[in-house]
Amino acid sequence: MVHLTRRLLSGITLAAMLGIATVSAQAATLHMAWSQDATGLDPHKQTAFSSLRLLELIYEPLVRVDASLRIIPAIASSWEFSKDGKELTFKLDPKAKFQDGTAVTPADVKASFERILDEKTGAAARANFLSIASIDTPDPATVVFHLSQPDVPILTAMSDVNAAIVPASEIKAGSIGTKTVGSGPFKLDKWDPNAKEVLSANKNWAGGATGVDGIEISVLPDEAAILAAMRTKQIDFALLNDPLVATLVPKEASLQLNRVPVLAYHVLQLNPSRKPMTELKVRQAISCAIDRQEVLDTASLGEGKVTGPLTIPALATDPNQLFCYKRDVEKAKKLMAEAGFADGFSATVIGATGEPPTAVAEAQVIQSQLAEIGVKLDIKMMELNVYVDAWLKGDFDMAIALNGGRADPYTMYNRYWTKSGNLQKVANYIDDTLDALMQQGRAETDPAKRKAIFAEFEKHLAEMSPWIWLYTSYSYTAQQKNISGFVPTPTGTLFSLSKVTIQ
């Protein structure tokens, strides 16, 4: 606690150095802080949480999901599937405008999805949209997606900022990622990487007036510094990732903690293309050797729950029914011996500094646990942008990761575990069973049958152990008690900052 107090005091100094002005209760600008900055501004390419949290305030998709994971309008005011499920028609909101005042048109929607589908783009969500055979724009308010097959989860996929609609003119100019012209509630006026973002209200936003005139976001790498700045009322609102800091917020009389379970999951990703992880029994041994509850308790103060691959409450399997979720060191040693590695092996695990802040602790617990079966694990921590580059290339033996969840399991995992997935380099594993189950789940419309299909998918994936799923945790935001209107969601989105007000 003495150490934390020192961190809090140093945080006050840090906040002062960054020039965060004390705000009055009537301020029209929301002063906000987070510990990780965006790694880029192209909404179609970004995978880091820190990038997505910023970009979803600037860009809009056709639809969104709300706090109950229901599809709601965004750029599109309505949508309809044809009876055979092979056509999806959207009517655009006639009030939808980009931040430069130009209307959002069907041509912009078509150009955006064609860009996402172009392999040269390197779009993060490309695999979600491979059923799109063609796109028609029959009139100034209508977009028709012609699909090669019924595709139940495509609507959920379209709710993600990775499917944001961008101006066709900016695509043609090649300026996506250097200029930010979206149709969302805020405009990005200034970005000083790893220091500050300045956002102003988009007066053209079809969603109506925002609750504040702007948002100034300070990047404070030490979350204890963020809490210190909140205690002195220099910061109105903060995104927190560290449970150690978040659990202190309720002790502050002037602050409110928003804490909700999220779909994102903490995971140890193995690389099954590298020896000896090429051996099923080695991967299974690693799964059996890891005590997931101990990882959760040590790294995240028990703030969460052990999970299998599926984190959507309505579809998740009880982890106790999955392969080796109860730690069994003797079974792990036996599997290692059967694979020809009775004496163990050496490997390196990579992690990103600060995202998540539990990464080092997770790696250290896993290092200790795997040592019991002879696996000598070297921990290599990297700056986030360096980590993301290595992660996207699959350039690791093992990786500590916090991956995003989605409201649909196909949308969540097809990019990793299907033969057409665009993040196969990250997963480095696919088999016919996984691919077939994903395709079945994609086309099946009956909810009960879909649940059974994805339960089988989850069971098989856990048994093959290309990754070792650890736990889900919480989304934490902290705010002064004179801030109202923020609605936390299981996806971790900060979009409702568009309606936040300062009393």
Image (cartoon, rainbow, N blue to C red):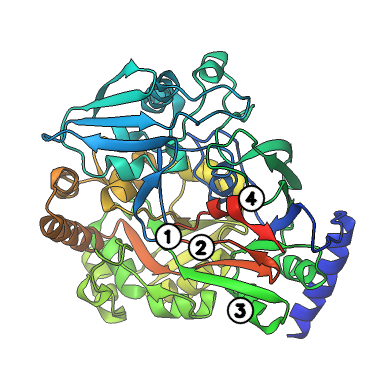
- Disc 4 marks a residue whose amino acid type is Glu
Identified at 52% across, 36% down, the residue is 43
Disc 4 from disc 1: Cα separation: 32 Å
First-in-chain label (4 vs 1):
1
First-in-chain label (2 vs 4):
4
Left or right of residue 203, residue 78 in this image: left
Q: Do residues under tags 2 and 4 come within 8 Å of each other at their CB atoms?
A: no
- Disc 2 marks a residue whose amino acid type is Pro
Question: What is the x, y in percent for residue 264?
Answer: 43, 60
- Disc 1 marks a residue whose amino acid type is Ala
Q: Which residue is mark 3?
A: 247
Q: Give the crowd class for mark 2: few <14, some 14-19, many >=20 residues within 10 Å.
A: many
Q: Give the crowd class for mark 4: few <14, some 14-19, many >=20 residues within 10 Å.
A: few
Numbered-mark total:
4
First-in-chain label (3 vs 1):
1
Label ID, residue 383 = 4
Viewport quadrant of the N terminus: bottom right
Label ID, residue 488 = 2
First-in-chain label (3 vs 2):
3
Q: Give the crowd class for mark 3: few <14, some 14-19, many >=20 residues within 10 Å.
A: some
Q: Quadrant of residue 152?
A: top left
Left or right of residue 217, residue 72 in this image: left
Of 397 and 231, nearer the camera is 231
Q: Do residues under tags 2 and 1 come within 8 Å of each other at their CB atoms?
A: yes
Choose mark 3 or mark 1, whichever is in front.
Answer: 1
Label ID, residue 67 = 1
Disc 2 from disc 1: Cα separation: 7 Å
Q: Quadrant of residue 131?
A: top left
Viewport quadrant of the C terminus: bottom right
Q: Do residues under tags 3 and 4 come within 8 Å of each other at their CB atoms?
A: no
Disc 3 from disc 2: Cα separation: 17 Å
First-in-chain label (3 vs 4):
3
